[in-house]
Amino acid sequence: MSKTGTFDLASGVGGKIEKKEVLSAFEKYKKYHACDGEAEEERKANYIDMVNKYYDLATSFYEYGWGESFHFAPRWKGESLRESIRRHEHFLALQLGLKQGQKVLDVGCGIGGPLREIARFSGTYVTGINNNEYQVTRGKELNLIAGVDNTCNYVTADFMSMPFADDSFDGIFAIEATCHAPDVFDCYKEIFRVLKPGQCFANYEWCITDFFDPNNANHQRIKREVELGNGLPDIRSMGQCIEALKQAGFEIIWDKDIAIDSPLPWYLPLDKSHFSLGNVRVTVFGRFFTRNMVKILERVGLAPEGSQKVQAILEQAADALVEGGKEGIFTPMYFFLARKPSAN
């Protein structure tokens, strides 16, 4: 089960980083997001280190607040956050047309919440690839608890250079993960390589929308804060993603910003002005409680030094995501379904 207590949260901060090194790791991570012209290139050149530091530092907070699936979902009125996330994962499996016994790849799988749900729903064998050792270890623990360790497994590796043969998988999906790639074309090209001909790749990307104005200082601030608080080298546009897919060799079946059709705003769980009994921990009350508990736990030495700083940038990122959603300049649910052409 997910780690539900504040002591679980505190004990997990830092992931595989030594507890005494958490603060210095945080400071190194933050330097990747300095406001200078070289920062973006440094993030891309050192994306493995940057993303690993981010998820070592942030995963326990994610699991504490969101459970096992770290992603947004279109949400209907009267539906809990977990219900909407599960339905969202089933939708993705249906779009791929998954069949029992097929081999499927989850690119950037986190701790495996979607991986397990899709395997149970579709009857497929799902492999998750993730370069973060802490998340993989945690995912394996959760597989055992859920009793799906025979159908779900993990490979610790970089999804920019995957240790799989060409044409290995019957379907591939990614949920809010390939946004961490330093180069979206190279990422999609590698996915294309390991996908079987005639099969599909489904993805939810984090993207800036056509309403984003690069000359608007407030838009740029929101973008920077989202990148800092979410381990991103750069947020791309939807057009850049589609062009990269085509260059990689994919045929586009359809694409759309799914967030537009959500009856409730996608950012509602993070909006401080909204209260939800179903997910109290991400409300303003929940954040206040978590902030002060982390402060106490760090002060008495149960949480490593630097835990409060990690929690602070995650709060800042949550606020930036809400701003980006309200301004209409950002979406976490740009969906596309693309096919690798059949071999002739």
Image: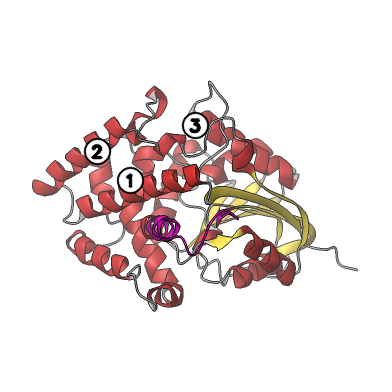
Tell me the residue at 35%/67% (across/down). 33
Question: Who comes first in sequence, dot 2 or dot 1?
Answer: 1
The disc, 3 or 2, on the residue closer to the chain's N-terminal end is 3
Q: Are marks 1 and 3 in contact (CB under 8 Å)?
A: no
Does the magenta portion include 220?
yes
Is 128 situated left or right of 172 in this image? left
Residue that badge 2 annotates: 290
The image quadrant of residue 106 is bottom right
- Cα separation, mark 1 vs mark 3, equals 17 Å
Residue at mark 3 to residue at mark 2: CA–CA distance = 20 Å
In the displayed structure, 128 sits above or below 259; it is: below
Closest to the observer: 128 or 252? 252
Tell me which amino acid carries mark 2: Thr
| Label 2: element kind | helix
Tell me if 246 is positioned left or right of 303 in this view: right
Q: Given the image, on which type of amino acid does mark 1 rest? A: Phe
Image quarter where the C terminus lies is: bottom right
Q: Disc 3 marks which residue?
A: 82
Comparing 46 with 104, the one in front is 46
In this picture, which residue range is highlighted in magenta?
Answer: 205-226
Residue visible at 57% across and 39% down in the picture: 117
**Marks 2 and 1, how far apart in space?**
9 Å
